[in-house]
Amino acid sequence: MGGSEPVISDAVRSGDLLFLSGRAAVDPVTLEVVSDSFDEQAAFVLREVGEVLEAAGAGWGDVLRVECHLADGADFPAWNRAWCERFDPPRPARMTLVSSFPMPGILIELQVTARVPGSGS
């Protein structure tokens, strides 16, 4: 520790699989939650996931599985709307849980598994 390296990786690749670390709506510079709106947090998280996928040579169509954690089950309908706007059928496998977060104010966190196209399978 002692350097400026991140505590966790954005993603780790194993063969043709890409495992993204959990993404929450936290500004990487200020380390503060970006909004108290669920819709804004969901959009922020999905944008960040898209950037990590693109950096690895993958895209939304390569996503295989999404694990979603919500702070409040009442946000489930809003999550379903965001999900359907982001993913066309057939959509990836998914699970959604209601969880508590170590940082107050986080309303959603995603963990994504994708394939990297053109990597041999």
Image (cartoon, rainbow, N blue to C red):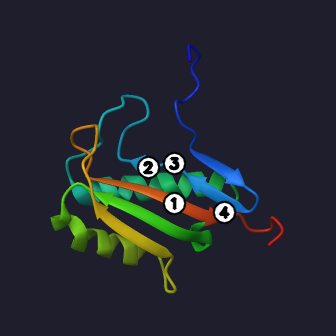
Which residue is identified by label 2? 23
The image quarter in which residue 29 lies: top left
Which of the two marks, 3 or 2, is nearer to us in this view? 3
Distance in Å between CA atoms under marks 3 and 1 = 7 Å
SS under mark 4: loop
Which of the two marks, 3 or 4, is nearer to us in this view? 3
Tell me whether the residue at label 2 lies in contact with that at label 1, contact meaning CB atoms closer than 8 angstroms: yes
The image quarter in which residue 45 lies: bottom left
Q: Pick the quarter of the image with the N terminus.
A: top right
How crowded pointer 2 is (Cα within 10 Å; few <14, some 14-19, many 20+) is rated as many
Which sits in the foreground, 50 or 2? Answer: 2
Which residue is identified by label 4? 58
How crowded pointer 1 is (Cα within 10 Å; few <14, some 14-19, many 20+) is rated as many
Which residue is identified by label 3? 21
SS under mark 2: strand
Q: Pick the quarter of the image with the C terminus.
A: bottom right
* Sooner in the amino-acid sequence: mark 1 or mark 4: 4
Which of the two marks, 2 or 4, is nearer to us in this view? 2
Mark 2: amino acid: Arg
The residue shown at (68%, 61%) is 17
* Sooner in the amino-acid sequence: mark 3 or mark 4: 3
